[in-house]
Image (cartoon, coloured by chain):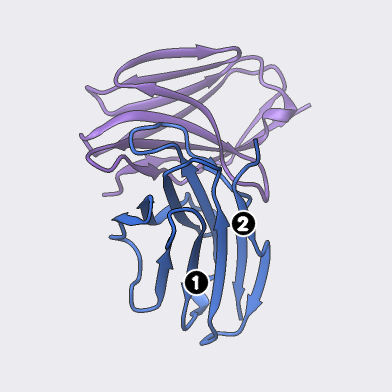
């Protein structure tokens, strides 16, 4: 079974530029999560999708971050414009559905904003 | 107050030691409690989960949850150098089963 795929693995951009991350969850997984993990901290949920609908985006900085999962499969997370404090690892995870305890994580995209 | 509090350590132990990792939580809606392990530059992977209060054992690992005190524990017996990683506790519950993590504890097991 293929795992959660994320790309790119690394990205370096200047502040005020835009960036996009892509995630392909495990086939058949209805729930998809985007987390931000700043160095030395635990993952912080940015947005949670159930199929192509948003379940929770209460911690997503909506003035600069956006995410979509148009066909209920792949997802993209965008930052525009980026700030220095956005430097972090962006993790995508998926699970079979709401109430399924096991979330499978991708390797993450390491973003550095200079 | 953060929903899940975890001492970030770092924690360094000799090989073969018993390791105790702990978290507290504040969200009464949590029903599931998980421990994830994260190796450097990798995504977290689920080690164990527990539903409500109680103990769960899997090989050298034991997870405990005490909902009355809102306390989560992970014990590692006969620790190995390969156990060196960051351990993240997490809670889940409520209508959308949002998965909320603690800060993680960095564990080093020295040969």
Residue B102 placement (x, y as % from top left) = 42, 43
**What residue sits right under mark 2 in the picture?**
A6
Which residue is situated farthest in the bottom direction here?
A16
Query: Does the residue at mark 2 contact the one at mark 1 (Cβ under 8 Å)?
Result: no
| Residue closest to the eye, A54 or B92 | A54
Q: Secondary structure at mark 2?
A: strand
**What residue sits right under mark 1 in the picture?**
A86
State which quarter of the image contains the C terminus of chain A.
bottom right
State which quarter of the image contains the N terminus of chain A.
top right
Q: Residues within 10 Å of mark 1 (few under 14, many from 20)?
A: some
Above or below for B28 versus A30 = above
CA gap between label 2 and label 1 equals: 18 Å
Which chain appears blue? A
> Between tags 2 and 1, which lies in front?
2
Residue A62 placement (x, y as % from top left) = 33, 73
The residue positioned 22% from the left and 40% from the top of the image is B95
Above or below for B97 versus A87 = above
Above or below for B14 versus B10 = above
Q: Is residue A112 left or right of residue B15?
A: left
Which shade of the palette goes to chain B? purple
Q: Secondary structure at mark 1?
A: helix
Q: Residues within 10 Å of mark 2 (few under 14, many from 20)?
A: many
Q: Is residue A109 left or right of residue A83?
A: right
Which residue is situated farthest in the front direction here?
A71
Q: Is residue A39 visible?
A: no
Q: Quadrant of residue A87?
A: bottom right
> The disc numbered 1 marks a residue on which chain?
A
| Residue closest to the eye, B85 or A11 | A11
Residue B72 placement (x, y as % from top left) = 38, 27
The residue positioned 47% from the left and 75% from the top of the image is A79
Q: Earlier in the sequence, mark 2 or mark 1?
A: 2
């Amino acid at each position: 079974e293929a795992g959660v795929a994320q790309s790119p693995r690394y990205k370096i951009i200047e502040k005020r530029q835009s960036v996009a991350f892509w995630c392909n969850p495990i086939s058949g997984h209805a729930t998809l999560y985007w987390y931000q993990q700043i160095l030395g901290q635990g993952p912080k949920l940015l947005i949670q999708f159930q199929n192509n609908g948003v379940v929770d985006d209460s911690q997503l900085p909506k003035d600069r971050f956006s995410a979509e999962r148009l066909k209920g499969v792949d997802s993209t997370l965008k930052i525009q414009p980026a700030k220095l404090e956005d430097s972090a690892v962006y993790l995508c995870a998926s699970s079979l559905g709401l109430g399924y305890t096991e979330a499978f994580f991708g390797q993450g995209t390491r973003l550095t904003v200079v | 107050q953060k929903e899940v509090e975890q001492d970030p350590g770092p924690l360094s132990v000799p090989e073969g030691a018993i390791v105790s990792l702990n978290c507290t939580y504040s969200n009464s809606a949590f029903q599931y409690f998980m421990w994830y392990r994260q190796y450097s530059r990798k995504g977290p992977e689920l080690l164990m989960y527990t539903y409500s209060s109680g103990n769960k054992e899997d090989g050298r690992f034991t997870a405990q949850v005490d909902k009355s005190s809102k306390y989560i524990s992970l014990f590692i017996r006969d620790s190995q150098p390969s156990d060196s990683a960051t351990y993240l506790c997490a809670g889940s519950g409520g209508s959308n089963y949002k998965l909320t993590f603690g800060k993680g504890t960095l564990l080093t097991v020295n040969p």
